[in-house]
Image: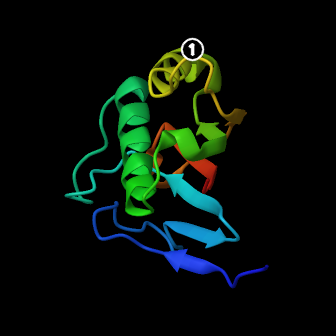
């Protein structure tokens, strides 16, 4: 049975930096828009310094969206990670990212080096999740 897409936005999640929904859901599949390391309580606050702190903020922002959907990281099947300083930040980002998932429950993932991200962020991550 095909459902119409549901476009989700959450007040607790960070303010949009572009025209998008925080997540779009259809037939139990959910695409979470890439999150930036912005403070969900103060969009004008400076980004955290360094890729470790920025990765934590991004993951925490994604968890806010997941929780708004009644989900958690156990529902995540795939992630895409975007890094502006790939060679420099890859290992630290990986250590931080890995700490959010239980052993043996790592989603499929792609990690891409990019030339720039909004607000001069060092990292952005998006996710695909599925309702049980």
Q: Where is 55 relative to 88, above or below?
A: below
Q: Is residue 36 left or right of residue 117?
A: left
Q: Where is 1 relative to 27, above or below?
A: below
Q: Is residue 66 left or right of residue 32?
A: left
Question: Which residue position is annotated with label 1?
Answer: 91
Q: In terms of depth relative to the viewer, which is nearer, 30 or 54?
A: 30
Q: Element under label 1?
A: helix
Q: Which residue is the extreme one toward the right?
A: 1
Name the residue rendered at 41%, 47% in the picture. Answer: 63
Q: Position of residue 91 (x, y in %)?
A: 57, 14
Q: Position of residue 112 (x, y in %)?
A: 71, 36
Name the residue rendered at 50%, 40% in the picture. Answer: 73
Q: Which residue is the extreme one toward the bottom?
A: 4
Name the residue rendered at 61%, 26% in the picture. Answer: 105
Q: Position of residue 68 (x, y in %)?
A: 38, 62
Q: Badge 1: how crowded within 10 Å, few (<14), some, or many (20+)?
A: few
Q: Is residue 40 left or right of residue 74?
A: left
Q: Is residue 53 left or right of residue 9?
A: left
Q: Is residue 116 visible?
A: no
Q: In terms of depth relative to the viewer, which is nearer, 40 or 3?
A: 3
Quarter-wise, where is residue 113 in the image?
top right
Q: Position of residue 61 (x, y in %)?
A: 38, 49
Name the residue rendered at 35%, 39% in the picture. Answer: 57
Quarter-wise, where is residue 43 in the image?
bottom left
Q: Is residue 104 visible?
A: yes
């Amino acid at each position: 049975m095909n459902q119409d897409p549901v476009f989700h936005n959450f007040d607790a999640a960070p303010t949009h930096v572009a025209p998008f929904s925080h997540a779009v859901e259809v037939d139990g599949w959910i695409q979470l828009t890439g999150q930036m390391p912005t403070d969900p309580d103060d969009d004008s606050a400076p980004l955290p310094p360094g890729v470790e702190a920025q990765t934590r903020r991004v993951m925490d922002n994604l968890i806010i969206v997941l929780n708004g959907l009644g989900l958690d990281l156990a529902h995540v099947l795939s992630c895409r990670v975007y890094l502006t300083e790939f060679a420099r930040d890859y290992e630290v980002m990986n250590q931080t990212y890995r700490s959010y998932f239980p052993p043996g429950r790592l989603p499929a993932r792609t990690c891409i080096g990019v030339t720039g991200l909004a607000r001069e962020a060092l990292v952005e991550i998006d996710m695909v999740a599925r309702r049980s």
